[in-house]
Image: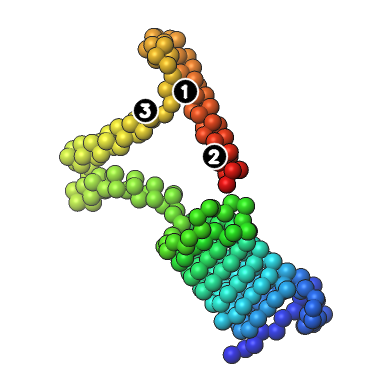
Amino acid sequence: MVRARWWSLAGAQSGIKKPRRGKRVREVFLGPEIVLSGELKSCGTLVAEGIVDGSRIECREFILGSTGSCKGEVQAESAVISGRFEDRLIVRSRLLIKSGGHVRGSVQYGQVEIEPGGELQGDMVVHPASKHAAHDESATSVDYTAVDYAAAEDAATEQLTEELAESKKKHGKITLKASIGTLWRLGRSLLAIVEELEKRPRGRFYHRAIGMLPVVGMAGDYLGERSGLKRVAKRAQQWFGKQSELTART
């Protein structure tokens, strides 16, 4: 096993320089195929493209590259994970898991963002130092994988038109039965969309009455929806005001 040797990026061209004791290292780079086992404290930024095994890391910013892996405990102000992390991760501010990044274990964070293709699995707790910390900080076991919404939409489209594809594959053309079945499914999907749209805020009765008239009906619908949105916004402000008062009292 190769032991990692640490150096500041600023002095990498002139050779390897060990950090002085009691002085914060500004930036540390762990290259590919290099293994670190042990402790690293008082570090500004740690960029790990190699292997961190059974270590305890304390730094301001922790960056785990796509070729890197880490198994141990890391405490940082912010972290960006593109590789594989396992064990305990404490991020006081923002945790970003990029596409291809995998985090498993016990995780504390102030804010978390997971890109499509990223994965967070384990016990998650909002860090108490975060401004966005929840009142209830009990850990919950989760298995969360970021959803690729574009791929999900493509899969839903394929499901709606699968009968057409099967018909073309089997008979060499699109049959009438396949066309009718596909139109039926598309019609049901459109009805579901209409039902959701009906849930939007609506105006008062006179707005709806104007909306039924020719020519000026569009203006009536617009004014009605605008009036409904204003009422919803007013109620929301009242609700947030009450919540702020309750928070201030507690």
The local secondary structure at tag 3 comes to loop
Quarter of the view holding residue 48? bottom right
Label 3 or label 2, whichever comes before in sequence order: 3
CA distance for labels 2 and 1: 23 Å
CA distance for labels 3 and 2: 29 Å
Question: In the image, which is nearer the foreground, mark 3 or mark 1?
Answer: 1
Q: Mark 3 near mark 1, Cβ–Cβ under 8 Å?
A: no
Badge 1 is on which residue? 228
Badge 2 is on which residue? 243
Question: In the image, which is nearer the foreground, mark 2 or mark 1?
Answer: 2
Q: Label 2 sits on what residue type?
A: Gln
Badge 3 is on which residue? 198
Q: Position of residue 183 (x, y in %)?
A: 25, 36
Q: Residue at x 68, y 78 (%)?
A: 40
Label 3 or label 1, whichever comes before in sequence order: 3
Q: Residue at x 51, y 73 (%)?
A: 86
Label 2 or label 1, whichever comes before in sequence order: 1
